[in-house]
């Protein structure tokens, strides 16, 4: 089983922590303000708002070297809720990978709402976690954690696909904010 560290104790951090534990893995849950606590996991899930990534890189970048780092953020402009804050040809995950060159950065969980992770379903479908990254071993390790918890892991391709995952999540969030989709619902990946 894997040793997972989760930075962030909000709804998503708690939901992902529950999944990790359900799959029989070890969970270290860290509050982002507790920089004095070392990150011990081989896989580190950043369950934080996009704006917190720069501070995490500055305070914990050295601790993340050699680890699989999972970016779940969505770079949404919350002032207007009308756009993403990264260039159209980029992604938050790509920016994070550039800032952490000694880590294996993957994008995952950003297209899921906490409720669908907790229940394990989107409507009648099993919750699917889309995973994008350039390191096959990193994606496989995270896929094992996801499937051990009873969810579907879907390889979404290279880290370059993170921009589409972030756009998909942005659309899903705007639909939920506009009450056209439930925050406990979302999009399902049907095979």
Image: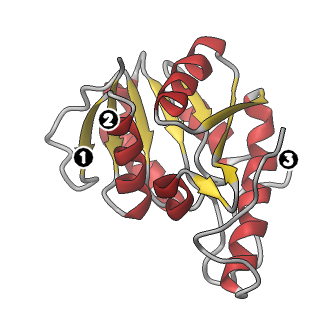
Q: Can residue 84 be seen in this view?
A: no
Tell me the distance, in whole angstroms, between the alpha carbons under discs 2 and 3. Answer: 30 Å
Outermost residue toward the bottom in this view: 178
What is the residue that sits farthest to the left in this orientation? Answer: 36
Image marks 2 and 1: residues in contact by CB distance under 8 Å: yes
Residue at 52% x, 36% y is 150
Disc nearer the start of the sequence (2/1): 2
Residue depicted at 62% across the width and 83% down the height? 79
Residue 61 at x, y percent in the picture: 38, 32
Q: Which of marks 2 and 3 is nearer the N terminus?
A: 2
Colour approach in the figure: secondary structure
Q: How many C-alpha atoms fall within 10 Å of the one at disc 2: few (<14), some, or many (≥20)?
A: many
User: Cα distance, mark 2 to mark 1?
Assistant: 7 Å
Q: Name the residue located 70 percent from the left edge and 87 percent from the top edge.
A: 179
Quadrant position of residue 43: top left
Q: Quadrant of the N terminus?
A: top left
- Give the percent coordinates (x, y) of residue 10: 36, 63
Dot placed on the residue nearer the N-terminal end, 3 or 1: 1
Give the left or right position of residue 46, taking residue 156 as reference: left
* Crowding at mark 3 (Cα within 10 Å: few <14, some 14-19, many 20+): few
> Which residue is denoted by mark 3 in the rendering?
89
Q: Give the residue displayed 82% in from the left and 48% down from the top.
A: 164
Disc 3 versus disc 1: nearer the observer: 1
User: What SS does tag 3 mark?
Assistant: loop
Most extreme residue toward the top is 137
Q: Name the residue under label 1.
A: 30
Residue 50, position as x, y percentages in the image: 53, 57
Give the labeled residue for mark 2: 5
Which marked residue is nearer to the observer: mark 2 or mark 3?
2
- Residue 160 location, quadrant: top right
Q: What element carries label 1?
A: strand
């Amino acid at each position: 089983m894997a040793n997972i560290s989760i930075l962030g104790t909000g709804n998503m951090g708690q939901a992902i922590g529950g999944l990790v534990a359900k799959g029989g893995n070890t969970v270290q849950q860290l509050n982002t303000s507790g920089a004095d606590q070392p990150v011990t996991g081989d896989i580190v899930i950043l369950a934080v708002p996009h704006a917190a990534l720069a501070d995490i890189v500055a305070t914990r970048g050295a601790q993340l070297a050699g680890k699989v780092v999972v970016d779940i953020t969505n770079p949404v402009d919350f002032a207007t809720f009308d756009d993403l804050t990264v260039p159209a040809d980029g992604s938050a995950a790509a920016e994070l990978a550039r800032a952490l060159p000694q880590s294996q950065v993957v994008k995952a969980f950003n297209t899921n709402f906490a409720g669908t992770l907790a229940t394990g379903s989107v409507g009648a479908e099993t919750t699917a976690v889309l995973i994008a990254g350039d390191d096959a071993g990193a994606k496989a390790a995270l896929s094992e954690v996801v499937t051990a918890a009873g969810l579907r892991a879907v390889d979404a391709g290279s880290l370059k696909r993170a921009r589409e995952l972030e756009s998909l999540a942005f659309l899903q969030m705007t639909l939920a904010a506009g009450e056209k989709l439930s925050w406990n619902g979302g999009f399902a990946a049907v095979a």
